[in-house]
C-alpha cells in the first residue's frame, strides 16, 4: 500500500519505529543496488555496534567493493540513525565518517531524520545558506577530494534520483531513492504499523504550516 506522503514519511521518526525502518531500508537498498551495479561490483551489508544511552545495539550499513580487488571498498552508504546524531553515538559516528573520508572510498550519507544535530560530512553552513530543509543527503566523491555534493530535501519533496560514482573507468550507476522508500513502505506494511501514529503528533513537532500540510495528506487516507 502506498503511503500518504509524497516523499519520506515523517512519522517513522517517532520512537519505536526507526530501528525497524533502518534495518528494512538498508536490506532493500542492498538488493536494489546489486541489481543496478555492473557485474564487477558487489554491495553487501556490514554491521557495527553503536551505543544508545547505556545500551549497545547492532546497526547496518552498506559497502560496495570491486570484485577484481576485493580489498578495495569503492563506496560506503550510511542511513543515519537517531543515535548517530547526538552524544557519544554522534562522536563515534563522526570518527568513522572521517576514516572513510580519508580513504579511497566514496561516502554517501542519507539523513532522513528531522531531529538531532547536523552530522553528515557536508558543512551545515552550506545547507542553511539556501534556506530551510527537512532531510539531507551528502556525497563525498573520493575521485574529487574535498568536494562534497549536498541534496537538501523539504518535508513535501520526493527523495531524489542519484547518479553515484564507482571507479574512474566505470560510469556512475543510478539509484532511485524514492522508489526504494516506496517499496520499503509497501512491503513492510508501514501503513498498518503507523495507523495509530498518524492520529498523533509527529516527533519532532511540526510547525503550524507543516501540521496543516500533514493533515491534508492524511485526510481521507484509509489503511486497507
Image (cartoon, rainbow, N blue to C red):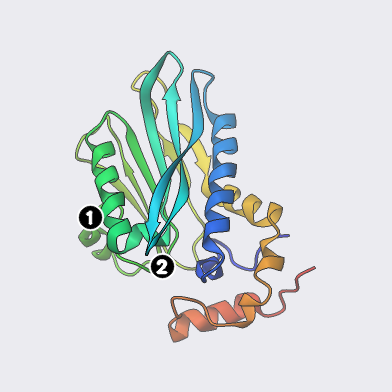
Q: Residue at x 63, y 82 (%)?
A: 199
Residue 96 location, quadrant: top left
Task: Say left or right for 92 vs 199.
Answer: left
Asked whether the viewer can see residue 163, the reply is yes
Q: Which residue is drawn at 30% across and 68% down?
A: 131
Using the image as rendered, state which of residue 155 and residue 49 is in the foreground.
49
Please tell me which of labels 2 and 1 falls first in the chain: 2
Task: Return the mark for residue 114.
Answer: 2
Q: Where residue 79 sits in the image (x, y, percent)?
A: 44, 50
Q: What's the distance in space between the residues labelled 2 and 1, CA to CA?
A: 16 Å
Using the image as rendered, state which of residue 11 and residue 179 is in the foreground.
11
Task: Say left or right for 39 vs 221.
Answer: left
User: Residue under circle 1?
Assistant: 123
Q: Which residue is drawn at 54% across and 82% down?
A: 201
What element does badge 2 sit on?
Answer: loop
Residue extending farthest top: 68
Residue 224 location, quadrant: bottom right
- In the rendered view, would you say 82 is above or below 183? below
Amino acid at each position: 500500500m502506498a503511503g500518504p506522503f509524497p516523499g519520506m514519511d515523517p512519522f517513522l521518526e517517532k520512537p519505536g519505529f526507526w530501528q525497524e525502518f533502518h534495518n528494512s531500508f538498508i536490506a532493500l537498498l542492498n538488493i536494489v543496488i546489486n541489481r543496478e551495479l555492473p557485474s564487477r561490483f558487489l554491495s553487501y551489508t556490514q554491521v557495527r555496534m553503536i551505543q544508545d544511552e547505556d545500551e549497545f545495539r547492532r546497526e547496518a550499513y552498506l559497502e560496495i567493493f570491486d570484485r577484481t580487488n576485493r580489498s578495495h571498498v569503492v563506496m560506503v552508504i550510511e542511513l543515519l540513525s537517531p543515535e548517530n546524531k547526538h552524544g557519544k553515538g554522534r562522536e563515534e559516528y563522526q570518527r568513522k565518517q572521517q576514516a572513510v573520508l580519508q580513504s579511497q572510498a566514496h561516502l554517501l550519507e542519507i539523513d532522513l531524520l528531522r531531529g538531532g544535530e547536523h552530522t553528515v560530512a557536508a558543512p551545515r553552513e552550506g545547507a542553511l545558506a539556501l534556506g530551510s530543509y527537512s532531510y539531507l543527503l551528502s556525497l563525498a566523491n573520493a575521485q574529487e577530494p574535498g568536494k562534497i555534493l549536498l541534496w537538501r530535501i523539504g518535508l513535501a519533496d520526493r527523495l531524489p534520483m542519484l547518479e553515484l560514482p564507482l571507479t574512474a573507468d566505470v560510469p556512475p550507476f543510478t539509484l532511485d531513492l524514492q522508489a526504494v522508500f516506496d517499496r520499503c513502505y509497501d512491503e513492510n506494511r508501514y501503513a498498518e504499523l503507523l495507523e495509530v501514529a498518524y492520529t498523533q503528533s509527529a516527533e519532532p513537532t511540526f510547525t503550524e504550516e507543516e501540521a496543516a500540510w500533514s493533515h491534508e495528506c492524511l485526510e481521507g487516507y484509509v489503511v486497507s
